[in-house]
Image (spheres, rainbow, N blue to C red):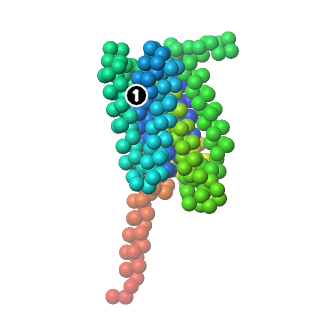
Amino acid sequence: MNDDLTIVLTAGLVATAAGLLGPFLVLRRVALMSDAVSHAVLPGIVVAFLVFQSRAPLPVIAGAAVFAIVCVLAVDALRGSGLVKSDAAIALVFPALFSLGVIGITRWASGAHLDLDSTIYGEIAFAPFDVVAFGGVEVARSIVLLGGVVLFNLLLVAALWKELKVTTFDPGFARTIGVSPTAISRILLIAVAITAVTAFESVGAILVVSLLIVPAAAASLLTQRLWVMIAVTVTIGWVSAIGGYSSAIALDASIAGCMGLVAFACFLLGLLLSPQHGVLARRVRARRRGRRIAAELAQRPA
């Protein structure tokens, strides 16, 4: 497999894994969770280094995953208390965990050059150089890991489709039929944490956060049906991966940065052209309403 195909396929798998979960984050108004996880994993990296005395990827990912799950459970517990809103719960938890990680580095690992950039925040351009033997063939490790995450997320969404749908749109009704919105929310957020941590190491935090949220936000402007929204989200993610990589090659620029910008461009197109919520559609409706009112006023007797 050549390097170009490896990079695009890696980004496409991230887009697919993120696209299966991103619409639920956007619809539940917890889109900042992925950004919170990207910072909250630092204590896990420190603990993994102190225990294994190594910055090898697997221990680092495992340590980061544990604290990512701690982060989402703490946010969900605070939000479930009813004392703080979702955004405030996120803003309370991730700075605390990030601060804990900074203290851990300065106190016990100051000489190890241990930080987010040097451990878990990967660079997608390096994906073709990290290979594993899979079925007698050398394959990029990122493709194997992310392929597993895609399969896990697909099975999770398929198995909990009705529960995810009812708790997203009507939590009150979900309780009356015996479905716990809290339990489903925690399962969803843990899946987000696993997806984010696994993808961080391969493609970097900026691209993960972008592909979790931006395609889903764009898709929410284009359709009201959940399964269509997920399909459109995954499609926009792949367009971002292919278009972003082509742009990066043409401009000799950051691959992750170009993919993020293409995703944002897709969102802007949705914002402009959405048949229901788009800027153009709103202006057309406003103009038609103005003409109708003017016509009604003209027909009234003086």
Q: Quadrant of residue 144?
A: top right
Foreground of the two, 17 or 7: 17
Q: Quadrant of residue 281?
A: bottom left
Q: Is residue 94 left or right of residue 179?
A: left
Q: Amino acid at mark 1?
A: Leu
Pick out the residue farthest to the bottom.
301
Residue at horizontal 42%, vertical 59%?
Answer: 282
Residue 259 locus on image (x, y percent): 44, 31
Residue at horizontal 35%, vertical 25%?
Answer: 104
Mark 1 burial class by Cα count in 10 Å: few <14, some 14-19, many 20+: many
Q: Count the labels in the image.
A: 1
Q: Is residue 96 left or right of residue 155?
A: left
Foreground of the two, 18 or 185: 185
Q: Which structural element holds mark 1?
A: helix
Q: Which residue has dot 1 on it?
A: 42
**Is residue 143 positioned above or below 184 on the image?**
above
Quadrant of the rendering where the C terminus is positioned: bottom left
Residue 166 locus on image (x, y percent): 60, 54
**Is residue 216 positioned above or below 284 on the image?**
above
Quadrant of the rendering where the N terminus is positioned: top right
Residue at horizontal 53%, vertical 38%?
Answer: 190
**Is residue 95 positioned above or below 62 on the image?**
below
Residue at horizontal 63%, vertical 32%?
Answer: 151
Residue 70 locus on image (x, y percent): 47, 36
